[in-house]
Image (cartoon, rainbow, N blue to C red):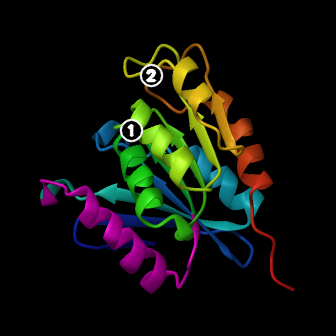
Amino acid sequence: MVIAYSLVVVKFILSPVSPYLIVLALPGAAAELRDEWLPLTTLLAKDMNCVCVLVYLDSMAKPWVVKDIVDILSVQVLLNTFHAEKAIFLGKSFGGLLAQEFVLQYPQQAISLVLFAPAGGNHDHIERLCKHTAVPLFLGWTADDPSYLHHSKFTRSCTQKDFVFHSELYGGHAITQEYYEQVSQFLTLYKPQRSP
């Protein structure tokens, strides 16, 4: 199913079982990154009994204003479309920037956060996430990615207990299959339990 809002287009991957958990996957802005979350979200929909929502930026709606997109995700996508108060967020590149901003603005709506090579992923942004939210964070970054942020300094500065950093040597600016297991384990660890 596909729904178009102003600024974003949403595509659903439905779980085969009655869903109760929402995963919002935000890819990078470049056209070649559009479907990068598809393999992982397809696995998650099956394994975690969730609805995976791939959020694409509307290329005709430039310039994008990050706050406007975050507000659309919070109100129109999560609350109005899915009637959900919380979601798991996956963000890559520019989608990582959106996911970070969402969690910083609406931490009460985030169950956990998975970032891959996030735009705006400087020390300050990551530290703000760690210091000002209690949202569990997984950060993946491939060492041969041109945008790679050397992590030794900021991982030591983050005191949040629920912070995981994982890096593969090769893969460039991509979410490679080597990350799937680590992300799945991380999300399963912080998956909320069903109410009886």
Res 176 → quadrant:
top right
Image disc number at residue 173? none
Q: Is residue 71 magenta?
A: yes
Total numbered circles: 2
Query: What is the x, y in percent for residue 90?
Result: 53, 51
| Residue type at the position of mark 2 | Leu
| Residue type at the position of mark 1 | Ser
Q: Secondary structure at mark 1?
A: loop
From the viewer's perspective, is 59 left or right of 196? Answer: left
Query: What is the x, y in percent for residue 6?
Result: 22, 71
From the viewer's perspective, is 142 left or right of 149? Answer: right
Q: Secondary structure at mark 2?
A: loop
| Identity of the residue drawn at 71% across and 70% down | 16
Above or below: residue 154 compared with residue 99: above
Above or below: residue 175 compared with residue 171: below
Q: Is residue 181 magenta?
A: no
Query: What is the x, y in percent for residue 47?
Result: 76, 57
Q: Which residues are magenta?
A: 61-87
Quadrant holding the C terminus: bottom right
Instruction: Identify residue for label 1.
Output: 93
| Identity of the residue drawn at 58% across and 45% down | 39
Classed neighbour count for the residue bearing mark 1: other residues with Cα under 10 Å, few (<14), some (14–19), many (≥20) = many
Query: What is the x, y in percent for residue 131?
Result: 54, 47
Image disc number at residue 149? 2
Question: Magenta segment, principal secondary structure?
Answer: helix
| Identity of the residue drawn at 40% across and 59% down | 55
Above or below: residue 106 compared with residue 117: below
How far apart are the alpha carbons under marks 1 and 2? 12 Å
